[in-house]
Each structure stands twice: as structure tokens, then as C-alpha cells.
Image (cartoon, rainbow, N blue to C red):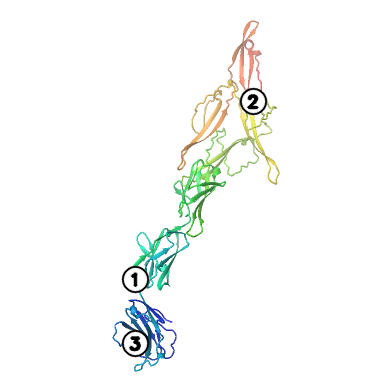
Amino acid sequence: MFAFGLHIYFTGRAAASSAHIWPEPVAEVVEGGNLTFWCLSYDKWDVAEFIKKNVNITVCTVDISLCACNESDTVYEVMCYGLEIGLKVIGVNRSSDNEVWRCGTREIGHTLYSSSMLSQKSRLVVKIPVGITGVTLSPAGTVKNISDSTVTLVCTTSGGVPSATVTWFRRTNTTDVSITYMSDSRSSEMDDMSVVTSTLTLRLSKSDDPMKIFCSASNNGTTYLSNTVSIDVLYEPTSPVCTYSNTVVTGVIMVTRGSTLIITCNSNSNPSPPTYTWTLPGSTIQTGASLNITDIQPSRSGQYRLLVWNRMTPTGGTSRNGTSDAIFTVNVQSTRFPRVKHSSDATRITIQTGASLNITDIQPLRSGQYRLLVWKRMTPTGGTSRNGTSDAIFTVDVQSTRFPRVKHSSDATRITIQTGASLNITDIQPLRSGQYRLLVWNRMTPTGGTSRNGTSDAIFTVDVQSAYQGGASQALLGTGASLNITDIQPSRSGQYRLLVWNRMTPTGGTSRNGTSDAIFTVDVQSAYQGGASQAHLGYGGTKRVLNMWVVYNRHGAFTQWPIPTACLEQNDSNKRHFSERN
């Protein structure tokens, strides 16, 4: 029906010969304040009159053409807006309390001859100003609230006249920032005074932590400040940032076998610090912001998951967990040092690639040593790339039916079987030399399947040496990938050992040596290895000389042939050639 401001707009047409006054039926004003009455009529009129009805006095007669009171009273001001006439009463005091005001309109030369030409009554109520005594903010103290949720704060004034004005502030390190535009204030009557309740609703984020809020209120010059509320914004752990070897890592972490794996992670949260839980391959659980595994082996390769969590309990709300995680794939790379082998056929090298070796129509000339080299390029996280290798060496013996290889054994018919993880033979003798085979087996019975044996074995050649073979002393023959001994003699027979080594220095770790070796038994064979020993035999009291010839065969056994010297000297025609083949 009307709008606040300098003037009022009436949306309906007034009844005939009727004026309207506003505010009505009660016009309130605080003592010392100003009050404006507005008068409107749709009839033809030139003059408006404002009347104090209870004393029946016309206090202001307004000529619309002049827009001024004909009476010279300085306590009134006139405002004209078309068919609307406003009369401002300046400095209302308590003596005007309960005055009744009306207005009417007429043409020049006419009078207000009936009450039907007057407006309805408006009773003036003059209120005595009462200042507020304070303002309170609730909830008080520290309020805990989870990020991305809302929190509601309420400021309430004491009673006063007129209604107080409430202003909200956010306190920062440098100043107090007004946030009143985010609030809503409402007044209510209590004991003829006005109580203002102002509500502030905030949606919080973790960047708001911490936050301090307070409000102020005033109505008669004095400004009151409320208590200050601290808002503790709770938030879940941020995505952890993890480092390995001083490098931030995500996804795959490459480490070298035998090194130390140290992954250190950090995550921000409130409350803090959060709890760190690691899940390792095989469902192993460890806790702490750092994971430390020494002497790591390829068996520890796999997926590593870090779960970071905290417990958030908001004020007046329900607790819940906040979580974040990080997942890594740890690849433990293994490096073995290649075994160097010496071969009489070193000049012929055939290279094939692939996981399988296929040779068709194999012949005895293909017999020999076969070496498989497996390698991979290793690029450790935060380190230097290098090759990792592993190999396997086989001796292939292609047998021919034309030239069978005969194996001699003086004890071929005797097979001794022992059980247990250890073999113990006391007072071992050369006759126990030969091939020893260990068979390891178990019985496997799968669910719903057929039982079968699983086996693996190892074969050893035991060479029992006697005091007659001498005790070889160890000597360093030289260095390099090849061993070359010219004019080799039987005296050089024995065990030869090749040691291959390198120095390994991992990134951020401790240096150590890596070694591999190969052992060979070199048997220098000779068609004639003389060295006759002498013995004196008696022939009828006469001394005779016996030459004792010792010949080594390829099996290491020896044969003695006694030949009388007298026979050899007396008759060359009687010389004989003796031989024996084993």
C-alpha cells in the first residue's frame, strides 16, 4: 500500500470525499526524533489541512501551489509530491504523547464541513529513548566445525529504545573486517523495549582456519562489543607428499637389491598430526610417517599403500574420520655379476636371443659350455641407470652311439642311500670318490586333484685326494679375463680358482663388494712320466738292479713294470715292450 522513504504511493483509489493519513492508526517516535505525516486525496483539491483532533486545532494549512504552511510555525516542514503532502514534525517531545492527528483536503474558498472529508485517525505515541546495556555472542568460547560445512552465530542485544543496530566483524592479524552483509537482524518487543537478534551463517573452508568473530551494537551513541568467538576449522589430511632419496616420488619407486628403502611422507590436517599406516606386500602393517626397510630384497617388491587419517569432532556434532592415501609400486632390482668361464673353444661364439634355445639335429661338435645371460636396464628413482644381470651356465654333452663314453667305476654296483638334510661320512677314503646325488621330494595333494611327487636334486662330484698327490699351495697367478700358461707341466696340475668382483656404491647407501667365482681342476696328462725308483732284489747273493717305471693313466691310477737291468744289458734282442691298458 505504501513505500518507505520520502513519500508514500497508494495503489488503490480512495473513496469519494475521503483523505488518507499515514502512518496510522499509530505513529511512533522516540523523544527528540522527527515524525512525518503524509496526506493524500484523489478528489479535486487545492488545500490540505493537518489537524490535532484531540484539541481540534489546525496546525498547518498547506496551499498546494505554494507547498508551505500558511501558519508561521518553525516546528513543521512541508513536502509536496503530486497528490501527496508531507508534514514533518520536528523534535517531538513527550508532551505530544497520545495526540490524535487527522488530515483533509478541499478547494480554495471551501471549508472542511463534514468529517467525511477528513482522514482516519492516527494516534501519536512518543517513546522515551532507552540505551542498550550490552550485546552477547553465542555460542561462546571456541567452536569446532568441519570444513565445507556451515556454522551459525547469534548476537543478542539488551532491550532499548529505539532498536539497536548490530554490526558483525571478522578479526584478522591487521584489522577488523565488516561482514554484516552476511547477517540477518530482527527486532522483538520485550517490556516496551526493542531486543535485536542478529544471525550470522558462515560456510567454512580449511583456509579459514583459524577464524575470530565478534559483533557490536548501539542505539543511543554508546557502542558495545560482544565477546569474541574462535572458530577451529577441522579438515581431513591433505594428500601426502612423499620423498625417497631427496626426490618427491609418486607411482613407481625403483630400488637396488640390498639397499635401504626410506620413504618419508608429510600431510597437513586439523587436528594434527594425523596417523600414518603403511600396508606392505603380504598385508604387513607398519605405522609412522617414514617407512624404513634395510637390505631390501626382490621378494619385497609390490604395492605399498599409505593411509593417512585423523578423527574430527565438531562442537555439538558427530565425530567422523578424515582420510587420504598414497599408493606406490616398489620394484627391487637385482644385479648379479657375470661368471667368467674359460673354454678351449673360446673363439667360437654363437649368440641367440629369447627365453628358449632350440637346436635341431644336434651333433657332438656342438658339445661344450652354453651360457645364458639375462639382463635388464635399471633406472632407480633419483639415481643413475645401470644394467643388472643374471646368468646360467650349462655343459651340453652330445653323445654318439659310435663312440660311447665309458665311465669307469670300481664301485659301480654299490649304491648307498642316506636320508636327512646333512650327509656325514667319517674317515673318508679315495675309494669313496665319485658322483653323489641329493634328491629332495615332497608329496603334493591339491584340493580336488590328484596327488603327485615334487622333486629337485643336486649332483656333486667328490674327489678324495691322498697324501701321494701332494698338497698344492695357493699362489696368485695373475689378473684379467684370460689365463695363459705356456709349456704347462704335470707339476702345474691342481685346483685353479677365478675370483670376479666389483665395487657397488648405491645412491644414498653404503658401498660394498659384489663377488662371483669359478673353480677348475686342471689335470696335465703325460704319455711318459718317468721317475724310476730303484729297489735291490737278491739273486743267489748277487745284487741286481731293478728299474721301476711309473706310468699315469688318464684316470689317475698308476702301474709299475719291473724290468731286470741285467736282461736289458746282456741281450738287446731279448728286450721286450710291456704295456697295459686300463
Measured Cα–Cα span from mark 2 to mark 3: 148 Å
Q: Residue at x 50, y 35 (%)?
A: 501
Question: Which residue type carries mark 1?
Answer: Asn
**Tag 3: Cα neighbours inside 10 Å, few (<14), some, or many (≥20)?**
few
The residue carrying mark 1 is 220
Residue 137, located in which quarter of the rendered image? bottom left
The residue carrying mark 2 is 432
> Quick check: can you spot residue 481?
no
Q: Position of residue 44 (x, y in %)?
A: 39, 91
Query: Mark 2 vs mark 3: which is more N-terminal?
Result: 3
Residue 57 - label: 3
Secondary structure of the residue carrying tag 3 is: strand
Contact? badges 2 and 3 (CB < 8 Å): no
**Tag 1: Cα neighbours inside 10 Å, few (<14), some, or many (≥20)?**
some
Question: Which residue type carries mark 3?
Answer: Ile
Q: Residue at x 39, y 78 (%)?
A: 4
